[in-house]
Image: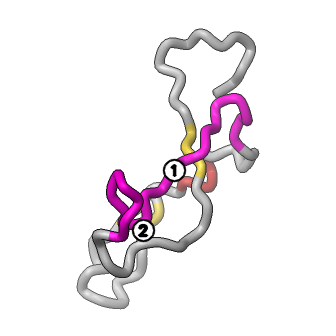
Amino acid sequence: MKTYKPVTKSFRAMTRIEYRKYLSGHSPHKPLMRGKKQSAGRNAFGRITMRHHGGGHKKSYRMVDFSFNKKNIPE
């Protein structure tokens, strides 16, 4: 746990988990990755229905293997 110095009122009781210690830092396993389709504010006909939505960086979705059917994969 990381505790912060009380520089402001909100920092006085703030504690967090140091995730960098527990994460491996390796890239995710490719067979468990899928592309994520973004609608970008468009409806089923492809027409813009919500303003100011769209653009941004391409995102990928990490599949969670709840069935544990992949062998010899540490994820």
Q: Residue at x 47, y 19 (%)?
A: 66
User: Residue 9, image x and y in percent?
Assistant: 24, 86
Label 1 sits on what residue type? Lys
Residue at mark 2 to residue at mark 1: CA–CA distance: 39 Å
Q: Position of 35 compared to 41: left or right?
A: right
Q: Residues within 10 Å of mark 2 (few under 14, many from 20)?
A: few
Q: Secondary structure at mark 1?
A: loop
User: Residue 34, image x and y in percent?
Assistant: 61, 39
Task: Tell whether position 14 is magenta.
Answer: no
Label 2 sits on what residue type? Thr
Vertical side of 52 occupied by 65: above or below: above
Q: Residue at x 46, y 72 (%)?
A: 54
Tell me the quadrant of the picture where the N terminus can be found. Answer: bottom left
Using the rendered view, name the quadrant where residue 47 is placed: bottom left
Sequence-first tag of 2 and 1: 2
Tell me the quadrant of the picture where the C terminus can be found. Answer: top right
Using the rendered view, name the quadrant where residue 61 is placed: top right
Mark 1 — residue? 37
